[in-house]
Amino acid sequence: MSLNTTLRSAISDNLAQTVADYKDFHRTPELSMQETQTAATIRSKLEALGLETRTYGGTGIVSVIENGEGPVVAYRADTDGLPIAEDTGYDYASTAEGTLPDGSTTKVMHGCGHDTHITVGLYLARYLVEHKDLWSGSVVMIFQPGEETGEGARAMLDDGLWDSTVKPEVVYGQHVWPGKAGHVYVAKETAMAMSDCIKVTVRGKQAHGSQPENSVDPIVLGAYMITRLQSIVSREISGRDMAVVTVGTFHGGLKENIIPDSAEFKLNIRTFNEEVREVVLNRIERIILAEAQASGAPEPIIEEMYRFPRCYNDPATTDQFLEAAGSELGAEQVHLDQAVTGSEDFGAFGDDIDVPYVYWFFGGYSPAKFDGDEPPAGNHSPFFAPDDVETTLETGIRAALSAVLSTVGK
């Protein structure tokens, strides 16, 4: 749906304040499920619009914008930061610190762009409140914590979100990424991968480093496991299917001349469908147990840390979004794209109540940066932040409004 001139003018007139709000959120990120100040700010800004708010999952904020009879839609924005020391060089760069689950202190930044998502969500709410003549129905605004750890959506749902809030007919969401500012990218059907995170504790037998014959070395054993795990994708998964098996951490031992009694590594697995996922998880367990047995080691401990569901864009809803966003931004600015191997817990909001949803991306880099000699930094990088903030925010707001109004618009 194409926005009218009055609404476009309002977006343009408020852009300086929109950018200022974005920079405030950028300066003050908080770690997953610790977004207390962020949640308080969101609540305050929504209540200033005359909206009631409710809290779910500890730091999740929900507000329902009601405007007479009509369809019900939901829009979700995530709010958490990452344990990264920012290195963008911007004068509004984050210097915030947070505490990790193990008690250690870390620098924190919005290295995935959730500051952008918060700002777009708040201004979407503002324009829906200020321009009720353009639509009728209800819009459920969801500000979700803990997306980075896969905890937030489930925490809000388990806290009774859809038991105490009007259920939507469709759910919308979006994400900034290293695309060209002003452009929108969306995939049909599978949009983002499932993700599993597994912790493996390799158990061995401690001995002096000079007497390896008295040990079962968990570091050597872990190295064999990790090397063999890399053969799953190359030798046990069809070339027609997608799978990624990554070992992101490996820790063992405290001193160079002591063979430790245990080591630990963590895996991240990405797949596009449930059948391939089950094959990969089965092969991982088989290899880990077999390598332990081959080394005469005690059975290792395999623990699931968390899981992200598949993000599946309903085809009909995606077509509707493509038409609406193309009408608003220009068809040449809206791209039908391929699925990405990143993961999201956004889909849980629709999957839990069996309603369709669509999730898209919008670019954050100016043409000069996007087309420059060096590829622009991606999400989860200390260098990631939109360099064309105005266009990025304006595009996010217009895309969100066009999607929501395509269902509730008059």
Image: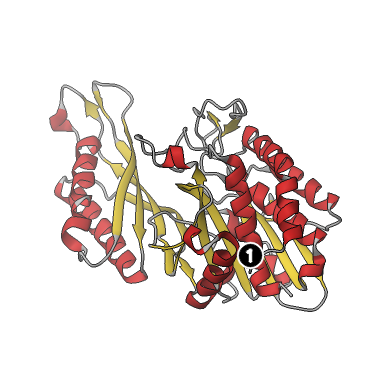
Tell me: 84 left or right of 97.
left
Tell me: 290 left or right of 169.
left
Q: Residue at x 56, y 57 (%)?
A: 174
Q: Residue at x 31, y 37 (%)?
A: 262
The answer to which of 22 and 257 lies nearer the viewer is 22
The answer to which of 231 and 17 lies nearer the viewer is 17
How many tags in the picture?
A: 1
Q: Which residue is drawn at 62% across and 66% down?
A: 403
Residue placed under numbered mark 1 in the picture: 402
Residue 118: image x %, image y %? 65, 48
Q: Is residue 33 above or below residue 53?
A: above
Q: In this view, does 43 lie above or below 127?
A: above
Residue 165 appears in the figure? no
Residue 106: image x %, image y %? 53, 29
Mark 1 closeness class: few <14, some 14–19, many ≥20 residues within 10 Å: many
- The C terminus sits in image quarter: bottom right
The answer to which of 168 and 306 lies nearer the viewer is 168
Tell me: 116 left or right of 208.
right
Disc 1 residue type?
Ser
Colour mapping used in the image: secondary structure
> Quarter of the image holding residue 235?
bottom left
Dot 1: element: helix
